[in-house]
């Protein structure tokens, strides 16, 4: 059974991931993963820690003579960033897990919650998804994405998949050049202000066979999985599938069918490739809204949990903007979701058996 | 272990639900559930079937002498709506599960996918959630909601929980009277046009203890569960937690702490009651975007899957607007999520033990 | 995803079951299920309640025009047995769930634990398994079993599958005639003594393709599932896979390979058809040890939980021997396990796709 | 939610484990784990690889300032044993995963299945269970075990928990001195013969509060979990709970209650501490039957999967007897099961809250 697991502390020795249920006989390319990890790391506006991390990755198990074996694939990535300070900390940062962690576990030193847990685990999520995406390529499936907005700056254009496929031409994964230039300036201003900013990204998947997922088992609906996976990622506060056209009438919103050139196709793709919990063969479109990063250089109002006096937060190393890093993270996340559905639908033995059946069904 | 299961076909004999992991010793009120089912059923704009259904509910197991026993609680609701026609159907309705079901299972008679599966199962979801909400009342937790928009009509005001608590004063669960009158007219127009419309609802939970959920186990984050549960509900295409203020700077968005009147409180609640996968003690705010119902009286362009000719869809009995029904459904769904977290955090034996510990921790 | 759920109280209105993840396009025979339920009910030594129950079963959902739809299949069986008494009960019967239920939930009236929970749920387990076994017949898989021992009476012969295939020639599912006659007398004596007795049954599956299960994901090993499923059944205290030849040397125990008649075969089947968590193509043999039923007519020593005085238990309606009923229950349980593995290995869409691939792989 | 995950290849760089759902505030002792790993490794009759492995273990995450943080605990153990040969291998060893792995995945080089998967993963299982057992000590729970038989040699005595508590006085975890001396000689003979042998071990848990588990949710019954966990361990073919007294009448087998010294106690413990899926407060007794190790120095009859000719197997480094190693492995496994039930019953926040509630309930 396909399943993933992730562990590791933000400044512990290693980050670790496990993927189970991968069929045997698949060749994996380590450089493919490294490239994705770089795309996650090197966006404009990220903090100094990103210079420390090389995100060198080891595939520790599940491979023999270059082929997957069916055994759990385990990944190890060393953390280079070390804890910069060790003194106890009692003033929770608003928006972070300091206060809520304290309320769950009752231990006052907030380092336990924040130093040891952060969005660092998305490096493993990205690596796992990168493996999944390599496998999806065997099925001709492509996944890409781009930065749709940063703060009040927004790119309202609609793009074809071909236009977004090579999204990493700049370090913000912005497709429109004018928007890019404004965004760089805007981020510089925010850095100056010791502040942070959120935004939106879009993740699009192409060439997925229709009929993946479930139309009746609610938590195996592909949209339910999209909600579950993306809402687990730090900073993501909103998930939207398809076009934001909910003010339209049904007759306008509905994606009518048309038969031409010996093919059933659609006049539009407002539902974003998913109908009734199943893929419909059109591009799967997911839009994610990210809140600004909570940790900022600017001091914020807070309360010392020990003295119960009003105090200012003190700075902890952080990024200013992570919106664009969500593009490769989101592509990886989407890859995990789709690959799981393929194995659920076509089984988990040998990749050649699975591929044969997938393409046979694609033609039907 | 808390878990729910739902089965039943839209026009089969019974809808059925199972809730596992409910502690022993809880008194359940059947009328409480019936009231919630009525709220789901009787909103303006729903179709004729709703007049047929009485949603009479039987608690079939898990109760002895009026108290829960710890055994699975099972629910049975009889379907009164019968299949109005039985002839084979080959023309998929855009937006529905016809085409995608066909692509998964390969059987051409689309009745198999649509007659037998629909949003009818949300009647069980509502009933299950209604049981959960009764139990949440033992913990002083309250959940309510309202209709925020229907088509292009939107209510942009912010309300206190007290203002929305009694949301069912009208049959659209709209708080603003002017909006309500416009909405009724608007829906009448849409009916006339044989069309449908979507919208937004907001679900708010009050008095939830901080620290429920997980800050490190991604799929046990409470936001991940919100994504998973709500995205499984038909028509829901967008889920947003907290305020839609993602254009703001971190320093504005962050909900600063303040200590006054011997209590730690917040200046705002932009994150909507969830930080780092855990509840933070503030109101949990979830906003849902619903697409228009796909089945409309107006004929739409489609393709006959047998003849492969372009054809118009034919009408199948349906609603015009279901947005407001999402209010009680959403309240029930949120109840399920929160109750599961309480049992995860405080155990599953006897409700008195659990309550004692909950309130002990609340004070800490 | 294949999954089962069961609910219902022993003397509640209905017993209920749900099976999810069944592919579309399968024809189910209700009489097939009824026959299995009768085999479960009509064994010698069962109590009076079995005369009351007709185990009439309704397939409530997941079927359209005689074919499965892919939606959850739900089953309903009415309980005819009613609670014979309603007065509170404070004296726990040793071996039953009275005392342990009380210790978990803290409510003193033991009816809550025992009247409402019993082995009655195995009627649903049997029905679910009967559906699974019908589907397994599409793959040429056969499952049967027999009573190996009752109390000190034991049948030590080894049988070929053909000899056990038609196991229900007598009402104890005993293959050896002499053993059968002794067993009937023995059970009569035990009834006379107001006592109960346990025993052993053997469940054998034939024609299962090799390679089902997992060799590296421990809880998806087929032996792990055998342990999990069978140990959940009331009275089962021991599960053994293969032959009880653990005193032999590896060189004797190991099932050596031999190639003859253009086929790889084995000299023996001591491992009982499972190697390293996977089926190996040989017959899967499972032996179950059942303790005597705890509820007996004879009064036993116990303690009144309210007065804390030593008291005798009072009688509650029960069976004397259920060992042989475990044969159809066990066959059903094994059917569930094997079918789940087939869907995990070959997917869950349409039965024709799955069958094609199964038989293709069988030949390889 | 409590969950464990294990990955790593037998001769890969690292073995890895993850435990989720551990409360915050627990101090863990690394030496405690190391001691358990040594007990697993250093039994008489194990192969040469055990001399290579030092089983040095790193707790990689989930700890801050010596206390657990609530985040996933991850473990890393380096493999010292290297692949001794790398040439392709086509002759499956009977009893091993060679043939079944090939049948699942279709790749002919059997190294993929056997070199990379073996019982090596039980080193991580032992380490995870060792952490769990440390935590169980906070609840006064003790778990021990011993070797009950090796081949035809068997120890039929019944021991008190105190007699088995310090089980590691000799390197076979045998309690009876005469049996020990015979066993050493017997194993030496088997080595000489280039053969292997199986046997039985017993695992006993003391001081577990009654009422843990579930009496109605079948797969959360504690006996179902015992079946699931133990049957996943290589070589285990039989699991038996309580005493092997299934030939006795109910009136003899049943463990009658008696009230004396102000305490409810039992006259016997034939059910082995579990009634109706729940612990009953008595010692939990589990007996495991292990088959002989399949890999033996003696050549066995097999078939070359490539040439399809009858061939002899060739030797691969292995142990002769692993029965006694199953004692610490089984103790660890049982620790995992019981700890999971404690968290299910009492929650997962801070160990002090959980302990308080556990002991409060213990007194009730």
Image (tube, coloured by chain):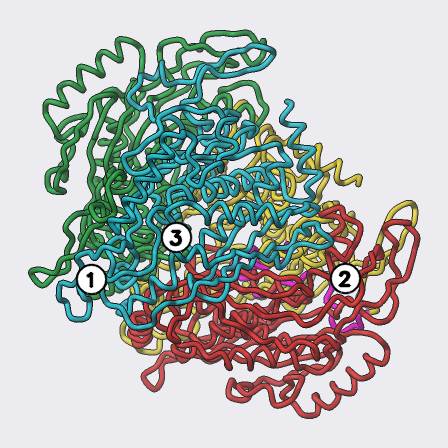
Chain colours: A cyan, B green, C yellow, D red
The percent coordinates of residue B106 (x first, y second) are 59, 24
Q: How far from the left and from the top, in percent, is residue D216? A: 43, 56
Question: Which mark lies nearer to you, 2 or 3?
Answer: 3
Chain of the residue on which disc 2 is drawn: D
Q: Secondary structure at mark 2?
A: loop
Q: Is residue B146 above or below residue B317?
A: below
Q: Point out residue D97 in the picture as x, y percentages from the top left corner.
A: 73, 58
| Front-most of residues C153 and C266 | C266
Which-is-in-front pick, marks 1 and 2?
Answer: 1
Q: Chain of mark 3?
A: B
Q: Residue at x 14, y 33 (%)?
A: B157
Q: CA distance from mark 2 to mark 3?
A: 40 Å
Q: Which mark is residue B220?
A: 3
Distance from disc 3 to disc 1, alpha carbons, whole Å, reads 21 Å
Residue beneath disc 2: D95
Q: Which chain letter goes with mark 1?
A: B
The structure residue drawn at horizontal position 36% and vertical position 15%, both measured from the top left corner, is A252
Q: Is residue C39 above or below residue C72?
A: below
> Badge 1 is on which residue?
B362
Q: Tell whether label 1 touches label 3 (CB within 8 Å).
A: no
Q: Which range is magenta?
A: C221-250
At 58% from the left and 9% from the top, the residue drawn is B307
**Is C171 above or below relative to B311?**
below
The image quadrant that residue C290 belongs to is bottom right
Q: Nearer the viewer, residue C139 or C222?
A: C222
């Amino acid at each position: 059974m396909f399943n993933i697991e992730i562990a590791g502390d933000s400044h512990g020795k290693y980050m670790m991931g496990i993927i189970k249920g991968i069929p045997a006989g698949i060749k994996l390319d380590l450089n493919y993963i490294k490239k994705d990890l770089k795309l996650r790391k090197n966006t404009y506006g990220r903090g100094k820690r990103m210079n420390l991390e090389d995100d060198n990755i080891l595939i520790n198990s599940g491979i023999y003579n270059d082929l997957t074996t069916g055994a759990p694939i385990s990944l190890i990535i060393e953390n280079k960033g070390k804890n910069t300070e060790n003194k106890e900390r009692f003033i929770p940062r608003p928006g972070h897990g300091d206060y809520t962690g304290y309320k769950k576990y009752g231990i006052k030193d907030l380092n336990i919650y924040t130093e040891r847990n952060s969005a660092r685990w998305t490096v493993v999520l990205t690596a796992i998804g990168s493996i999944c995406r390599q496998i999806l390529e065997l099925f001709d499936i492509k996944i890409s994405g781009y930065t749709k907005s940063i703060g009040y700056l927004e790119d309202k254009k609609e793009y074809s998949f071909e236009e977004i496929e090579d999204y990493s031409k700049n370090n913000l994964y912005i497709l429109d050049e004018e928007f890019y230039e404004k965004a760089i300036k805007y981020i510089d201003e925010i850095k100056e202000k010791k502040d942070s900013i959120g935004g939106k990204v879009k993740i699009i998947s192409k060439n997925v066979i229709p009929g993946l997922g479930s139309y009746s088992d609610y938590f195996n609906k592909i949209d339910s999985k999209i909600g579950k996976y993306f809402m687990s990622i730090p900073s993501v506060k909103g998930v939207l599938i398809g076009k934001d056209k909910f003010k339209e009438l049904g007759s306008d919103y509905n994606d009518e069918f048309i038969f031409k050139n010996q093919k059933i196709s659609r006049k539009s793709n407002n539902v974003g490739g998913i109908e009734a919990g199943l893929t419909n063969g059109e591009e799967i479109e997911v839009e994610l809204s990210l809140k600004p990063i909570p940790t900022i250089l600017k001091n914020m109002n807070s309360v010392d949990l020990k003295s119960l006096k009003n105090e200012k937060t003190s700075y902890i190393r952080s990024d200013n903007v992570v919106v664009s890093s969500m593009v490769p993270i989101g592509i990886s996340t989407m890859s995990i979701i789709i690959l799981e559905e393929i194995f659920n639908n076509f089984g988990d033995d040998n990749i050649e058996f699975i591929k044969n059946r997938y393409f046979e069904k694609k033609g039907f």
